[in-house]
Image (cartoon, rainbow, N blue to C red):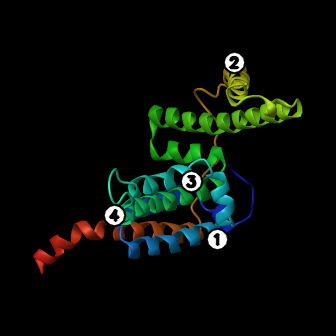
Amino acid sequence: MYAPGTSLAHRLDPRAKLAVQVGFALAAFAHTSPRGLLVGTGVVACCLWAARTAPWEALTELRLLVPFLLAGPLVEVVVLGPPWLAPEQAVAPALASYRTLLVVLVAAAYVRTTPTRESQAALQWLVPGKPGRALGLCVGLVARYLTVLRADLRRTRTAMRARLGDRLPVHERIRLVAVAGLGRVFDRSDRLALAMRARCLSWNPTLPRLRFGPADAVALGLALALIGWALTPALAPVLASLV
């Protein structure tokens, strides 16, 4: 979730930050060896440092994703038959899970340092015309909607615990949270549609002006370096044949 601040990443243009994300994702999936992931870890550390975000803070935001990343290697370790455990089979899934975690951490640094309106403006600049406006509007609505929906669900669970609802069976607690959550969703949707019509947000949203600065040149240079590093495995045979 976005947190206001004055860090280096907060001052960067969202287009430069998106370029770094794309370049890092390409590089992470092109270099899957431990050495490549080690370099990727260094890049992630730089991104989190620029965003003034501690790794454990980012992992807290991703706590729902971490169990799924750990499940892949654990499932591959277990085999149906002697010797029942095959640790060597978990190497590849573990590297893949770690690579995915690195990509998501870079995305978390972006989300934490970029307001929704700036992301919307960057997408509309990248995709001009009505498709860009529709894409930017969808991203803006999803980002805003998920934030308030999570807050509603958190308040529902707090109210349920205050009324000793945590002593109820699990299926009953799930039912109560689901019913209250759906009611909030429908209520929020109606109010959101009314607000969009009142502000003409569905066709001409007012967005901030985007400007590249000196620091953005460094970020774009990093993005180009990552993209070039990602293309190295594909271009190496071509260059070798030319030599």
Given contact means CB atoms under 8 Å apart, are the residues at marks 4 and 2 in contact?
Answer: no
Given contact means CB atoms under 8 Å apart, are the residues at marks 3 and 2 in contact?
Answer: no
Q: Looking at this view, is 93 or 127 the one in front?
A: 93
Given contact means CB atoms under 8 Å apart, are the residues at marks 3 and 4 in contact?
Answer: no
Q: Residues within 10 Å of mark 2 (few under 14, many from 20)?
A: few
Element type where label 1 sits in the image: helix
The residue shown at (69%, 23%) is 175
Between disc 3 and disc 4, the foreground one is: 3
Earlier-in-chain disc, 3 versus 4? 4
Q: Residues within 10 Å of mark 3 (few under 14, many from 20)?
A: some
Q: Which residue is mark 2?
A: 190
Could you tell me residue 93's position as x and y percent? 39, 58
Q: Which residue is mark 4?
A: 30
Q: Which residue is mark 3?
A: 66
Q: Residues within 10 Å of mark 4 (few under 14, many from 20)?
A: some
Earlier-in-chain disc, 2 versus 1? 1
Earlier-in-chain disc, 3 versus 1? 1
Question: Label 4 is placed on what type of residue?
Answer: Ala
Q: Which residue is mark 1?
A: 49
Q: Is residue 179 visible?
A: yes
What's the CA distance linking mark 3 and mark 1? 21 Å
Question: Label 2 is placed on what type of residue?
Answer: Asp
